[in-house]
Image: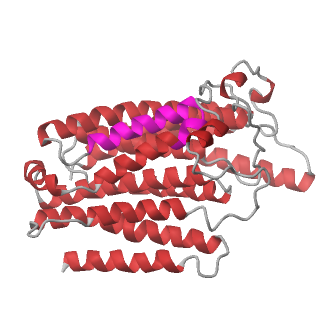
Amino acid sequence: MFIKESAIAGLVPYILLSFLLAFCSATVNYIMPFVFGAITLTLIFEAVGLVAGWGLVVSGVLELLILLFAIYGSSALLIKGLAQRYVLKGFGNPLFNVLLLGTTNASSSQSLGQEKKKNTKYAEPMALGFFCDTVSPFIFAFYAFNYFPSVSVAAIWITINSAAQLLSSYYAYMRQDCYHATKFGLHCVFWLVKAWEEHVLSVTSSRVEAGEVRHAMVGNWFFVSAALVFCIASLNKDTLELIHNSFFVLVTISTISQIPIERYYIFFGVTCSLFTLLSYYGTFARLINTIAEKSLIPVGPQPVSTESLQKYFSYLKRSKMDEPEDRGAQLPDALFYLSNGVAALSAIHSSQPSQVFSDLTVPWVLIPGAIIQAYVSRLQVQGGQRFGSVVPSFYVAIWATWTWFRFA
């Protein structure tokens, strides 16, 4: 099972991200940096504890420290609610206020000829989406470079992380943000499918045997085409968004099943490493810029204005200035078609497929076709449409039945 190696591979990205959160939390109050600092040290010594027992003792002491901070914070907020002012110190004033910092980089990320109204009803999920895009490829990089040959434990790490990414997709939907709702949903599907495909490979066959039957699998080509669509769709976003989508294209290309097995995992590991570094920077940039409500961390200019992009695609109708407030039922449509596309293309098989081939295609159909379609159906219900969830639910039944016959 290689539990220790898989655990270390999962802990390291969370250590890096908790350090990032400890730094960013200094813009909130005096308590949170110490809390996240203690969490960072706890994760470090949890990793040390996998190879040396004394690390678990230290992490236990740090967990007690986190508990004390939590009790103090709860007491401070409770007293503040009763007294209508901060009696206990540590809250109310941050270590440094990013709102007072300069706007040197503000001009670099301004939109070309458009001014968008800020949506303050729901929190921005972009940092969480980049956060999740840091953890999953980091774990895959360890696996691809053969740090641990079995992905069974790592698949649980990636599944939990993908659930958080699906949550970021949901919050983007609540903000009426079709682009990020679909992007984070697609990334969630990709990481889940790859994790459980590798899990099936680990328990049913070897890499060499799987390499022989993978040549007949074509589902990943849909991920490549979908990633290219997001590159085009992000031309009117900032440069960081465009580069992030371009690197995701490289990640999807590296997992094409027709690549020889001796080069497959090396290519996959390199692209995952690069994608991890970019996602880590994206997490920091999105988080700081969201807190500051200005562009303090460079994200680059907008490559193409929205008007120019619409002009290039003249078949698209120009959006009106006053859009209707309730467009919820239309937002999940893109994810609906993408999920069905992945499932349908992955379901294609030769006339006499081997058992290994049948096992490997199950995650490719079950996850996008049934699990993610159920999520899309839930979004359609949230949109307030009476029959909006019927069609996605129908496809859930179709792809679940297909999977059942594959097992049978």
Front one among 275 and 56: 275
Q: Can residue 249 be found in the magenta stretch? A: yes
Q: For this view, does 161 lie left or right of residue 109?
A: left
Q: Which residues are magenta?
A: 233-255
Front one among 28 and 35: 28
Q: Is residue 146 visible?
A: no
Which percent across, then down, holds residue 227?
Answer: 42, 45
Front one among 105 and 325: 325
Above-or-below relation of 231 to 379: above
Which percent across, then down, holds residue 96?
Answer: 75, 26
Q: For this view, does 299 lie left or right of residue 321?
A: left
Which percent across, then down, holds residue 70?
Answer: 66, 49
Quadrant in which residue 91 is drawn: top right
**Residue at 28 percent of width and 77 percent of height:** 402
Above-or-below relation of 201 to 349: above
Above-or-below relation of 160 to 57: below
Which percent across, then down, holds residue 40?
Answer: 51, 36
Quadrant in which residue 46 is drawn: top left
**Residue at 45 percent of width and 69 percent of height:** 373
Q: For this view, does 262 lie left or right of residue 85?
A: left
